[in-house]
Image (cartoon, rainbow, N blue to C red):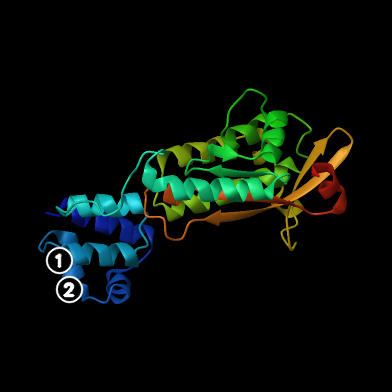
Amino acid sequence: MPSEFGAILKDWRKVRRFSQLDLSLEAEMSARHLSFLESGRANPSRAMVLRLSEALQLPRPAANQALHAAGFAPVYPSLSDDAPELAPVNQAIAAMLDHHDPFPGYAIDRHWNIVTSNKGAEMIVALAAPGGSANLIDILLATAGLELIENWDEVAVLTLSRLRTEILELGGDEQLSAMAKRLASHDRVRQVDMASINLNQAVIPTIFRVGEHRLSLFSVIAQFGSVQDTRAGETRIELMFPMDEDTTAFFR
């Protein structure tokens, strides 16, 4: 009878499309021992759980879950946003966004909720969803009937692709899956002819129409490489850069 840990291990192995032999080689262990762990015939040590978590590239919450299932305390902390230990992280986010002003920049969580943003981003969000949601997927869907995003179809399809990639990397996420389903089922997305989207471009920008201004911006996404907190470690900082002099002049 598989143990709870064995079931988690098997599920994640399948998510990562590893055979038992593939994973055993990646984790530098015998395939026989891996088979015993999955079937519940053997129990893992704490070091083995961590080794397998690394080999499977488990998200930190999933690694904590695997440790708990094996009878060990979680390794990665889950602190409140205002915890003193996270002050340097919050300061780093604020510094990046402030330095990037007047160009748009924001920090988002795992589910694409805007955690904080600079003035440039606040202006764009106010145009897209005045007094509304601070979730980027909600905002994108809300602008489908507006003329704010000139290349909405292109942006929506690329966003859907990004969402699906994140879901695969996380081994599934109910909230992200629901968001992807909403976006994929939108009439405009369903009617997009993929052949009409030129993917053979060095940069695919988001093009905003603000009055008579045509603003072309592309994004750079940054994540923390050493933050161990389960939530803060998933925070992404997205900085939008101008593609041309007219866009630069508008924001300045």
Front residue of 226 and 109:
226
- Image quarter (top left, top right, bottom left or bottom right) of the N terminus: bottom left
| Circles 2 and 1 in contact, beta carbons < 8 Å | yes
Furthest residue in direction right, as rendered: 212
Q: Position of residue 160 (x, y in %)?
A: 59, 46
Question: Whole-Å distance between the Cαs marked 2 and 1?
Answer: 6 Å
Answer with the quarter of the image where residue 9 lies. Answer: bottom left
Residue at coordinates 33% horizontally, 49% vertically from top-left? 61
Amino acid carrying label 2: it is Arg
Answer with the quarter of the image where residue 150 lies. Answer: top right
- 189 relative to 75, above or below: above
Residue at coordinates 54% horizontally, 48% vertically from top-left? 93
Q: Residue beneath label 1, please?
A: 36
Left or right position of 140 against 222 = right
Helix, strand or loop at label 2? It is: helix
Q: Position of residue 163 (x, y in %)?
A: 53, 47
Q: Position of residue 79 (x, y in %)?
A: 34, 42
- 203 relative to 99, above or below: below
Amino acid carrying label 1: it is Phe
Left or right position of 148 against 181 = right
Is residue 163 among what the camera can see? no
Answer with the quarter of the image where residue 198 lies. Answer: bottom right
Front residue of 140 and 124:
124
Furthest residue in direction top, as rendered: 131
Q: Position of residue 8 (x, y in %)?
A: 25, 53
Q: Residue beneath label 2, please?
A: 32
- Image quarter (top left, top right, bottom left or bottom right) of the C terminus: top right
Label 2, residues with CA under 10 Å away: few <14, some 14-19, many ≥20: few
Residue at coordinates 82% horizontally, 49% vertically from top-left? 248
Is residue 146 among what the camera can see? yes
